[in-house]
Amino acid sequence: MIEKGRISCLELALIMYATVATTAILYIPYVTAQHAKRDLWLSPIWGSLSGFLIVVIIVILSRFFPGKTLIEYCELILGRTIGKIIAFLYLFFLLHDTAIAFREYGEFVESAFLHKTPMLFVTGSIAISCAIAVHGGIQTIGRCALLFLPIVLASYVLIYIFLIPDLNVKNMLPVMADGVMPSIKGSLAPHAWLSQFSLMSFLLPFLTNQQKVMKWGMFSVMASVLTMVLINLGNLFLFGDIIINLQFPVFEAARFVSIGSFFEHIESIIIAVWVLGGFIQLSAFFYMLVLGTSQWLKLPSYKPFVLPIGFLIILFSAWTIPSFEDMIRGMGTTVPFYFLTVQLLIPILLLCVAVIRWKKPKSFLQ
Amino acid sequence: MKVVGILVVTVILVFIFLIQRRGLARSEKRVKRAFFSIMMVNWVFAVLLVIFPEMPGPGQMIDFIYKSFEPFW
């Protein structure tokens, strides 16, 4: 096998949580609020449907082909030519998705901290540190997630604990003033983000314990949705209706913290800690892309390709998104459809063909 | 300015090659071929982007394909 390292189910859940939630709490509230207004906290709950569905599909597919990733079983299910084409589409999507994630990281760090640094330096430097983690293999990323994510989570919780005196619960009323439609319309972006759980198929072969995958996958989706709902609620309680105009509400909330007028400007700590989460997310994306590419080309090792593919990602991150405004507009309009067609339709297609061809996986009832 | 950009890109790619050189020397022909194709793609795209920074990319392609979905939402 191309990868020797192994991860535990908890590490899998944490990596997937970081992959989805890190940028979801930054960008999704703004995109969702454009449609859902005051009901933006309901949108991730609708979005969770995609997340649960995709975890079920990916886990069943992994029972059909234990020890294989999506790129490998694509070829087994659909035959050599069509399989290669579909796998290439998926890989291209993954490259694009990774580039978007790097760009999101860069845009946030630049607009919050490093106003005058060129974007390429911000994304390039994180790419180099991620490349070191990816070179270390999946085990390194898993351990990093185990180490860093508790700190990241604690920092999110701390912001809103410090803000308790300023939170106004009445801001969420009236709930569903215009019916359920606005929150469903706003759920497009959460749907797209949670569909990224299809990337789980790249990690499933490296688990030490295959028995409890479904449980931990579901747990990871639930944790991501719960984080999104709670962060949205916290922002809504704090800002009320002006939340529609805030591009980074979490960051603004951190800026708002002031205790006894001496404990202020904790946003700098929050960003520093957020970067840890960003590092896990970007390393996971980067790793999946490198692994997928080497499996697509049937190569014995992925390590020589870490740096060249890192360069390609940085190129794409500069090329695919002309500006910050374009990125935000895309997230609310076309990009979610793209995410959903690739990450939901391709696994569903694979599952249908697999069920027709083989009826039932041997280990399905375990 | 553009010449400097092309030079910088080339230097980075050569640097990547130098880092990977030892590992590559020991590996199969297939790995070498794949490595150099990816490096070639990198170089071509990077140079194109230096010369034409406004070149339409995959982002525009996605917009073009999925634009028609928008009115339904």
Image (spheres, coloured by chain):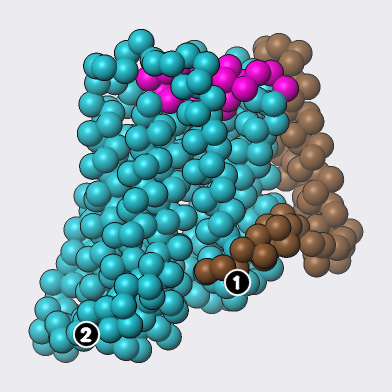
| In this view, A13 is above or below B68 | above
Position of B70 compared to A143: left or right?
right
Q: Which residues are magenta?
A: A61-81
Relative to residue B53, is residue A126 depicted above or below?
above
A359 and A9: which is toward the camera: A359
Instruction: For mark 2, name the chain.
Output: A
- Residue B41: percent from left, percent from top: 79, 40
Instruction: Please state which amino acid type lies under the numbered disc 2.
Output: Pro
Chain coloured brown: which letter?
Answer: B
Q: Is residue A118 magenta?
A: no
Of badges 2 and 1, the one in the foreground is 1
Q: Residue at x 23, y 73 (%)?
A: A233
Indicate the amino acid at tag 1: Pro
The residue where tag 2 is placed is A174
Report the disc number at residue B71: 1
Of the chain colours in the picture, the one used for chain A is: cyan
